[in-house]
Amino acid sequence: MKKYQLTIIGIMLGALGGSLYYYYVGCSSGTCPITSKPLNSSLYGALMGGLFFNMFKKEEKNELTQEKQIENYK
C-alpha cells in the first residue's frame, strides 16, 4: 500500500480538483464531453492527478539487476 501512496493521493486530489472545476467553471451548454457531468469531470481529474503524481514516484534501483543486464548484453 505504501508503494502506491503518492499515486492514491494524486487520484484523490485530482478528483477533488475535477469536482471543483465542474462546480466553478463547468459547461453551460451541456455539450462539453468532460465537464458536462460532475462524474466525468471528477474521473478525468482523478486520472490526470494520478498520472501527474505518479511522475514523482522514486523507484528503487537494484544494482544486482543492473549488473545482470550488463552481463546479458555482452
Image: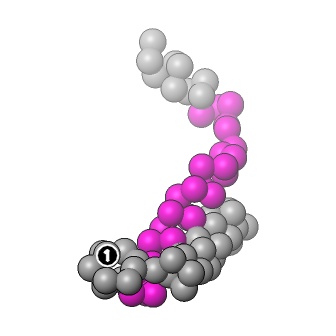
- The residue positioned 59% from the left and 28% from the top of the image is 66
Q: Residue 18: x and y, percent?
A: 53, 76
Left or right side of 44 for 13: right
Left or right side of 18 for 61: right
Q: What amino acid is labelled 1 in the image?
A: Cys
| Colour basis | one colour
Looking at the rendering, which quadrant does residue 34 occupy? bottom left
- In-front residue for pair 14/62: 14
Q: Residue 40: x and y, percent?
A: 40, 81
Q: Which residues are magenta?
A: 37-65
Farthest top residue in view: 74
Residue 4 appears anywhere in the view: no
- The residue positioned 38% from the left and 83% from the top of the image is 28
Q: Is residue 11 magenta?
A: no
Q: Is residue 39 magenta?
A: yes
Query: Where the C terminus falls, by quadrant?
Result: top left
Note whether 67 is above or below 40 in the view shown. above
- In-front residue for pair 14/56: 14
Farthest front residue in view: 28
Secondary structure mostly seen in the magenta stretch: helix
